[in-house]
Amino acid sequence: MTEADLDAVHAVESCAYAHPWSRKHFRDSLQSGYPAVLLLGEALPHERAQTARADGSVLLGYLVAMPGVDEMHLLNVTVAPAHQRQGWARFMLDALALWSRAQGAQWLWLEVRESNAPARRLYERHGFKQVGLRKGYYPAGHLQREDAVVMSLNLVPGDAAEARP
């Protein structure tokens, strides 16, 4: 992901979420040097005229992560609504886990809205375990807040400490 991609990324983000990241969130992540990658693919027939890139591909999804000492924190993973439920989120999680392990990370962390049952199921199927709850972490509209479920994935196969507090 580069600064030149931010209009397309923010357009997908705005379609995918009721409370999307701002363009500034993405720009700040890039300026901080966080790993941020795009998933590009073939355009569906109805996408060709509207959202295709110069090379004919479309933005299927993206992720942004933040490295730590022996961990990686997944900040944002999004699949464009037209391409959801096709395995792309799982594909990006696999890629992030492999890349993070190669960078020396032992843990992968994330927060997910407590109400986002499909995402929680995806993460659980991927091996993530719930390790905590952040009260009032997400905006929920009408001055309300929603809790975040904190999840972690052990990236070291056979590690005796399967979950870390």
Image (spheres, grey):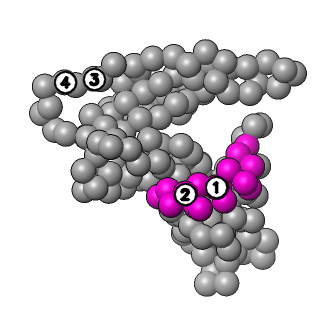
Give the Cα separation between the discs numbered 4 and 1.
34 Å
CB within 8 Å, label 4 to label 3: yes
Asked if marks 2 and 1 touch (Cβ < 8 Å), the reply is: yes
Q: Amino acid at mark 2?
A: Ser
Circle 1 crowding by C-alpha within 10 Å: few under 14, some 14–19, many from 20: few
Which residue in the protein does label 1 denote?
A: 28
Q: Does the magenta run of residues contain 136?
A: no
Quadrant (top left, top right, bottom left, bottom right) of the N terminus? bottom right
> What label does residue 161 carry, if any?
4
User: As drawn, is 146 to the left or to the right of 63?
Assistant: right
Residue 66 placement (x, y as % from top left): 47, 48
**Tag 2, which secondary structure?**
loop
User: Based on the displayed image, in which of its 4 quarters is residue 26 positioned?
Assistant: bottom right
Residue drawn at (75%, 49%) of the image: 22
Q: Quadrant of the C terminus?
A: top left
The residue located at (64%, 55%) in the rendering is: 28
Which is more toward the observer, 70 or 84? 70
Question: Start and end of the magenta stretch?
Answer: 20-36
The relative height of residue 150 versus residue 22 in the rendered view (above or below) is above
Q: Say if 161 sits above or below 24 in the image.
A: above
